[in-house]
Image (spheres, rainbow, N blue to C red):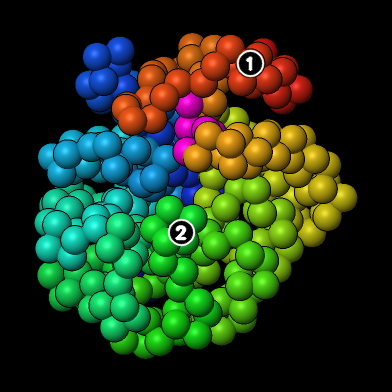
Amino acid sequence: MNPEELKSRLKGVVVTVLTPFNDDYSIDFGALHDNVQRLVEKGVHVFVAAGSVGEFSSMTAEENRDVVATVVKAVNGRAPVLGGASHSGTHEAIKLARMAEAAGADGLLIVPPYYLKPSLEGLFLHYQMIAQAVSLPIAVYNNPGFSKVNILPQQAQTLVERVPQIISIKETSGEIYQFYETLRLLGSKISVIMGREITAFFGLACGSPGYVSSLANLAPDLCLDLYNAFQDGDLKRANEVHAKIAPFNSLQAEALQKLAFPVMIPMIKDGMNMIGIKGGTVRPPMTPTDAGLREQMKSFMKEWGLL
């Protein structure tokens, strides 16, 4: 898939695929394949393999590669696949990028280097060196909540000018003004995707071509309904769908503040397990949900017609 085609197809519901782990923490590649096939058949538009929700930070480089390869095989050309290639070190990120390219990914999703916060020039260099090492187009993953690096709109503009292989930004700052300003500056040049599900409604209202969803692993129809309502120009229906999702988003945001990790990952896995779709468990240091959160997840699923 050439860069222009990929850019034009980075829209709609972009699912960041959960990685199902067995009780011994090994990856269940068969379940991963089946889960992705189910989402393709449901009509999900774009797939992210080995992203944050896929728990890339708990996987080896070889596992990262194999997860990307499994998703690519399951999708079988029916939708674009972005392979995660994120690491705190540039040379290791290049290794992951090359592996994702060899595994058949259509493009790369890359978060800024984390832990040792880079200078602005170091940030640019990180993406430039990766771009020079592979031929795949790149989607920048601005996620300051976890990377501690916030790519501001004007910085994003400079980054896109300096690295022509960048064809998209997953904007996950959570600030609607920042999202809109990035969209205003770059929306005619690249695909600026709303990266936080909790603000998906507002991103779509601003004109985003799509949004990234973790919930789509469990409830793809609900997530597609939200996007399709905007496509149809039906703001009333979009608001009704958003009202169904909003309590789940509010709970996970509250839990994130208390527990300091993305609790939606084990919550969505719980939900999948409840209805016979293997979500599996999470890998340490992440921990499973408690009984209280599982009961709340069950209530949401009843509201969504899944139980």
Q: Residue at x 38, y 53 (%)?
A: 80
Q: Which residues are magenta?
A: 261-266
How many numbered discs, if any?
Answer: 2
Q: Residue at x 23, y 37 (%)?
A: 59
Please tell me which residue is depicted at 13% across the width and 40% down the height of the picture.
Answer: 62
Q: Which residue is more in the foreground, 121 or 201?
A: 121
Residue 246, percent across and down?
73, 40
Residue 170 visible to the viewer: no
Amino acid at circle 2: Asn
Residue on which disc 1 sits:
292
Q: Tell me if mark 1 has few (under 14), some (14-19) or many (20+) residues whose alpha carbon lies within 10 angstroms of its own.
A: few
Q: Amino acid at mark 1?
A: Gly
Secondary structure found at label 1: helix
Circle 2 sits in a helix, a strand or a loop, which is it?
loop
Q: Position of residue 26 (x, y in %)?
A: 22, 21
Residue 102 to residue 38: above or below: below
Which residue is label 2 attached to? 143
Percent position of residue 103, x then y: 17, 47
Q: Earlier in the sequence, mark 1 or mark 2?
A: 2
Q: Quadrant of residue 72?
A: top left
Report the quarter where the C terminus lies: top right
Looking at this view, is 31 or 174 the one in front? 174
From the viewer's perspective, is 207 left or right of 166?
right
Query: Could one spot residue 63 in this view of the protein?
Result: yes
Query: What percent of the width, then of the height, locates residue 157?
Result: 45, 84
For the N terminus, the image quarter is bottom left
